[in-house]
Image (spheres, grey):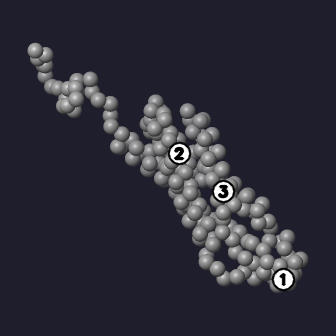
């Protein structure tokens, strides 16, 4: 089950990273001469990419955690909680790597446009995830803990049928 969680998580994070890389906001740059390009003043697209990284990885981590918790009752416990956290951290790094790769392939290297004076091109700002890298493991572990906390325990054998009352002492079945 642990290997399955790892495989599923990495595939989902990689696919999510590719979509993020395709949709990442860019700056528009204008080539003024062979050595200079100017960037039009726009909203802070680097922050927009950063915040979508944090939100996306957090949501993916929480959803995968909930699926694992609901589908695998036999592995519930502290080892799976720790495993989910580690896998989500690795998944967030995978998301970033695949997203950066796709964005670079889509928009190319800015140095390729140096010869085209007067040309405009898109520049993807680099993302430094910092603490956002820990959003996915944090939300995954939090979701797992909350699921454990709100999941009712199995009913004891000495529970009175259809009442929810636990019987104490001798019971007269007359």
Judge by depth and name the residue closer to the eye, 1 or 29: 29
Please name which of the two marks, 3 or 2, marks the residue nearer to the observer.
3
**Crowdedness near tag 2: few (<14), some (14–19) or many (≥20) residues, C-alpha within 10 Å:** many
Label 3, on which residue? 19
Q: Which mark is residue 64?
A: 2
- What's the distance in space between the residues labelled 3 and 2, CA to CA? 17 Å
State the residue at coordinates (20%, 31%): 163
Tag 2 or tag 3, which sits nearer the N-term?
Answer: 3
Which of the 4 image quarters holds residue 100?
Answer: bottom right
Q: Secondary structure at mark 2?
A: helix
Q: Is residue 109 left or right of residue 15?
A: right
**Crowdedness near tag 3: few (<14), some (14–19) or many (≥20) residues, C-alpha within 10 Å:** some
Q: Is residue 6 left or right of residue 103?
A: left
State the residue at coordinates (82%, 84%): 32
**Crowdedness near tag 1: few (<14), some (14–19) or many (≥20) residues, C-alpha within 10 Å:** some
Q: Is residue 1 left or right of residue 66?
A: right
- What's the distance in space between the residues labelled 1 and 3, CA to CA? 31 Å
Tag 1 or tag 2, which sits nearer the N-term?
Answer: 2
What is the x, y in percent for residue 91?
Answer: 60, 49
What is the x, y in percent for residue 109?
Answer: 80, 67
């Amino acid at each position: 089950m642990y290997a399955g969680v790892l495989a599923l998580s990495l595939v989902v994070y990689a696919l999510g990273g590719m979509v993020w890389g395709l949709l990442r906001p860019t700056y528009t740059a204008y080539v003024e001469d062979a050595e200079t390009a100017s960037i039009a003043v726009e909203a802070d697209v680097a922050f927009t990419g950063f915040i979508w990284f944090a939100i996306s990885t957090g949501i993916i981590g929480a959803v995968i955690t909930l699926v694992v918790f609901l589908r695998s009752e036999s592995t519930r416990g502290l080892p799976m909680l720790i495993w989910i956290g580690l896998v989500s951290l690795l998944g967030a790094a995978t998301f970033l790597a695949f997203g950066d790769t796709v964005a670079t392939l889509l928009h190319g290297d800015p140095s390729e446009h140096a010869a085209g004076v007067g040309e405009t091109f898109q520049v993807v700002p680099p993302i430094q995830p910092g603490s956002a890298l820990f959003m996915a493991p944090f939300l995954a572990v939090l979701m797992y803990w909350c699921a454990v906390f709100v999941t009712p325990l199995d009913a004891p054998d000495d529970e009175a049928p259809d009442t929810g009352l636990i019987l104490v002492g001798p019971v007269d079945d007359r």
